[in-house]
Amino acid sequence: MAIDWVGFAYAAAIALGGYMGYKRKGSVMSLIAGLVFGGFSAYGAYRVSSDPNDVKVALLTSGTLTAVMGMRFKKSGKLMPAGIMAGLSLLMVLRLLLFTIV
């Protein structure tokens, strides 16, 4: 059983991003969203670790974040945090899709 370290690191980055949004701007919504999406991403990484073909949860979470943060980046034009998270999430989607094919 191989552990999905990349998936767990991605989940930690999401949770940390939510925490940073809370600490810097006092945004409770950022904290909640970061913890919820980070939790789902960690669960997805756990599922991928258990069965490499079980990418549904991780793919749904990273795909949703790609869309949401991509729209926020397009609207605001700010690289931090929306552009960074949209890019990371898109890379995760591509990784998961390639992971299932190979």
Image (spheres, rainbow, N blue to C red):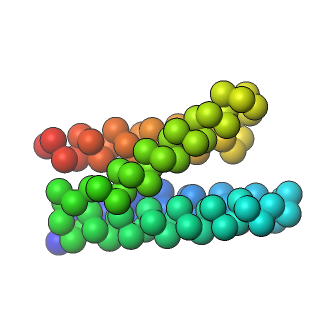
**Percent position of residue 5, x then y:** 36, 63
Residue 49 left/right relative to 20 = left
Seen at 60% across and 68% down, the residue is 35
**Percent position of residue 94, x then y:** 34, 38
Residue 34 left/right relative to 62 = right
Farthest residue, direction left: 102
Quarter holding the C terminus is top left
Q: Nearer the viewer, residue 5 or 11?
A: 11
Residue 55 left/right relative to 24 = left
Seen at 62% across and 62% down, the residue is 34
Q: Nearer the viewer, residue 88 or 60?
A: 60
Quarter holding the N terminus is bottom left
Farthest residue, direction right: 25
Quarter holding residue 8: bottom left
Q: Nearer the viewer, residue 13 or 40?
A: 40
86 shown above or below 2: above
Seen at 58% across and 42% down, the residue is 68
101 shown above or below 77: below
- Res 12 seen here: no
- Res 68 seen here: yes
Quarter holding residue 93: top left
**Percent position of residue 58, x then y:** 36, 57
Seen at 39% across and 52% down, the residue is 60
